[in-house]
Image (cartoon, grey):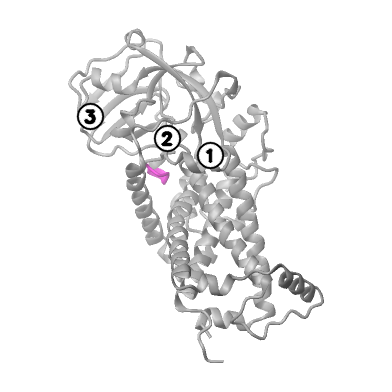
Amino acid sequence: MSDQKKIVPKKIFTSHEKEIIKDVYKELDIPTRRQFGKKALSLGAIAMLSGCSLSNEDSIEKALMVMSRFNDRVQGLLFDPNLMAPTYSEDMLTKPFPFNAFYGEDEIRPSPVSFKLKVSGLVQDTKYWTLPELRAMPQTSQITRHICVEGWSAIGKWGGVRFSDFLKRIGADTGAQFVGFRCHDDYYTSIDMPTAMHAQTLLTLTYADKVLPPQYGYPMKLRMPTKLGYKNPKYIQEIFVTNVNPGGYWEDQGYNWFGGS
Amino acid sequence: MNVVITPLFVRLTHWLNAIAVIVMIMSGLRIYNASPIFDFLIPKELTLGGWLGGAVLWHFAFMWLLLVNGLIYLILNFATGRAKKKFLPISPKELVRDVLDTLKGKLAHDDLSQYNTIQKLAYLSIIADIIILVISGLAIWKPVQLPLFSELMGGFENARIVHFLAMAYAVFFIMVHLVMVAVVPKTLRIMIRGK
């Protein structure tokens, strides 16, 4: 409802990233989004065109969700585990990299320094992990494009542990279907195992070679250049392996689950 | 005249395409509003989906209708030889004549089984435009898994601009198309009944 009135349109090739950050924040009008069930279907013209009755909103929504699940399968088939996302040079980094979450930048709830990562589900070793232990594992970094479902994109440099290394280290059942994430800010999401095992999927601990700052997800963020932004969880507290699709914060409201790019 | 001018497959794919294009444009405009690339927003009344997530659901459901229906149209159009018969030849001389006739307000519409040169170019242009929309759309949807389309479009950010401009051309085409149907209403009957 009010998600449009506050947006300041941007020019092409704008370099005012601060404006982007603000726009992204303003775009996040949670109550509006929650009305998805009704709002996605308030479309007199189309309903008339297709002969559907508006009283049948539920069946339209169901049909759209069937198509979204179909698109999950198509994207799963399309996903090539050996295909790498493009990487960029340092001078192409977007500065500053935009903050984005389902709340504003002033509402960040930093994770405690005493933080320990919980690991659960279909894994052999469920011991908690500290940051120094994760930093002691082999580290790698990459510069990739983060693409938001809203359409904007930004290039950033993330570094950390290759997620497939971590999954092997905890004895994860890599034949399982899903890896789920629970986050300190109550965000949650989940991904398919082939993407989890992709060489560019990193459990990141740094941004631009510095310890991941609070706005980018301290203590850790899962970074996948093969997926849209909302699939990349920040402030991760728990990682679990499962065969039951855990869904996600946005996914459960209607965003496509696979969210591949 | 009692001969079928527009075969059933053309009429069916035309109307299915009309539905797909309208849904794609309206839901696409809502997606545009989430992060506009130009200095303006689209009025909410012209958009479909209510919020970004809803618009994306519509867009990625009806893209299949646009794609599959469009492929069926193209394949049948070529396989039946209709494409060649209706669109060729395109003669520059006739184009000049048709443009001049149009400006004088006396472009002939008595034989609706034949396209004049302006029609040929207009219909070919919207076919090409929809192909560009599909390619730029795939470049935006799958910049990693389908890198060829992204490269063709000069990268992800360019693909967004191409996608929007190609959409704008489609809107322009539809408006002119509707005006022409209003000027020559018999064409509407032909697109429904075939003759």
Percent position (x, y) of residue A47?
Answer: 49, 66
Q: Badge 3, how many Cα within 10 Å: few under 14, some, many 20+?
A: some
Q: CA distance from mark 3 to mark 2?
A: 19 Å
In the picture, the disc for residue A227 is 2
Q: Going from the N terminus, do you reach mark 3 or mark 2 first? A: 3
Magenta stretch encompasses residue B92: no
What stretch of residues is rendered in magenta? A252-257
Instruction: Read off the chain for label 1.
Output: B
Tell me: A176 left or right of A199: left
Answer whether residue A188 is visible to the viewer in this image. Answer: yes
CB contact under 8 Å: marks 3 and 2: no
Circle 3: residue type? Thr
In the picture, the disc for residue B151 is 1
User: In terms of depth relative to the viewer, which is nearer, B43 or B124?
Assistant: B124
Q: Residue at x 72, y 70 (%)?
A: B95
Q: How many marks?
A: 3
As displayed, is residue A160 above or below residue A223? Answer: above
Magenta stretch encompasses residue A253: yes
Percent position (x, y) of residue B77?
Answer: 48, 69
Answer whether residue A96 is visible to the viewer in this image. Answer: no
Question: Which mark is nearer the camera, 1 or 2?
Answer: 1
> What secondary structure is found at the residue carrying circle 3?
loop
Q: Residue at x 32, y 47 (%)?
A: A73
User: In terms of depth relative to the viewer, which is nearer, B166 or A215?
Assistant: B166
Circle 1: residue type? Glu
Circle 2: residue type? Lys
Residue B80 quadrant: bottom left
Residue A218 quadrant: top left
State whether discs 1 and 3 lie on one chain: no
